[in-house]
Image (cartoon, rainbow, N blue to C red):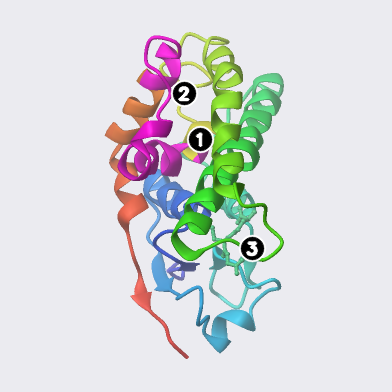
Amino acid sequence: MEPTPVLWTFKASPFAGKARAAFLEKGVPVELAEIHPVERPKRFLGLTAPGRVPVLEPGGGAPPIRESSIICEWLEETHPEPALWPADPAVRGWARGQARFVDDLLTANFFLGMRKQAFGRSPSDPEDVVDRLHRQLAKHWPALEAALGAHEGPWLCGGQFTFADLSALPLAVRLPEWAPHLVPDADAFPRVTTWFAALRDRPSAAAIDQAGKRVSA
Ligand SMILES: N[C@@H](CCC(=O)N[C@@H](CS)C(=O)NCC(=O)O)C(=O)O
């Protein structure tokens, strides 16, 4: 029998949320080990540097895997069905670029801004750091709208739902909940609006609210 992998996670983390959603999309059972980001358990810190969630322990004595996108790759390689990357290498390369764009320019800026808004800025941050981070979103909506026009939809690569779509799931769920004023204008960005709504409708969107069993030591 396959060992049940353990995914170290934190409910509010978008990158952990993306990994949790990937397990749901693949239909692969996983045990969630919940950390508190301020009091990260020693067992977790001993797994990988720099101690950020998500981290996957695949089980069966295999070493831990860090980085949400690499955990997604592990899932794709160990559980190829349903395929979450396009078979065509050219489209796959394009989709990987889109996933990176969403992670680095949309998700990172939005959630870092929310974290600073909730927990305060660092001493080296400019006073308007939250605004600066959140302004990045509006700057990138046009590129996202254009990317969604590259194929027929409903997903970035057309009919196939891929990891590039999955990357945006935490943002699609949290943006209207946490910062409705940052939601892109539906008239100016109709494809982004429809895509975000379709993402929220996927069963795997439930993963964004999933918390694991808290590990404290
Ligand atoms: N590129 C990484 C980002 C991971 C990351 O930034 N995780 C955050 C939560 S969203 C974290 O654990 N932060 C805790 C810390 O930096 O101390 C990935 O995709 O897994």
Tag 1–tag 2 contact (CB < 8 Å): yes
Residue 158 in the image, given as x and y percentages of width and height: 48, 16
Which residue is at 67% across, 57% downward? Answer: 125
Which residue is label 3 attached to?
A: 66
Name above or below for residue 191 compared with residue 205: above
Residue at the bottom extreme of this rendering: 217
**Which callout, 1 or 2, points at the residue further toward the start of the chain?**
1
**Which callout, 3 or 2, points at the residue further toward the start of the chain?**
3
Tag 1–tag 3 contact (CB < 8 Å): no
**Residue stretch in magenta:** 167-193
- Disc 1 packing (10 Å; few <14; some 14–19; many ≥20): some
Which residue is at 61% across, 19% downward? Answer: 143
How much space separates mark 1 and mark 3, taking CA atoms? 21 Å
* Figure quadrant of residue 187: top left
Q: Can residue 90 be found in the magenta stretch?
A: no
Circle 3 or circle 2, nearest the eye: 3
Question: CB at mark 3 closer than 8 A to ligand 1?
Answer: yes
Residue 101 in the image, given as x and y percentages of width and height: 64, 33
Residue at the front extreme of this rendering: 127
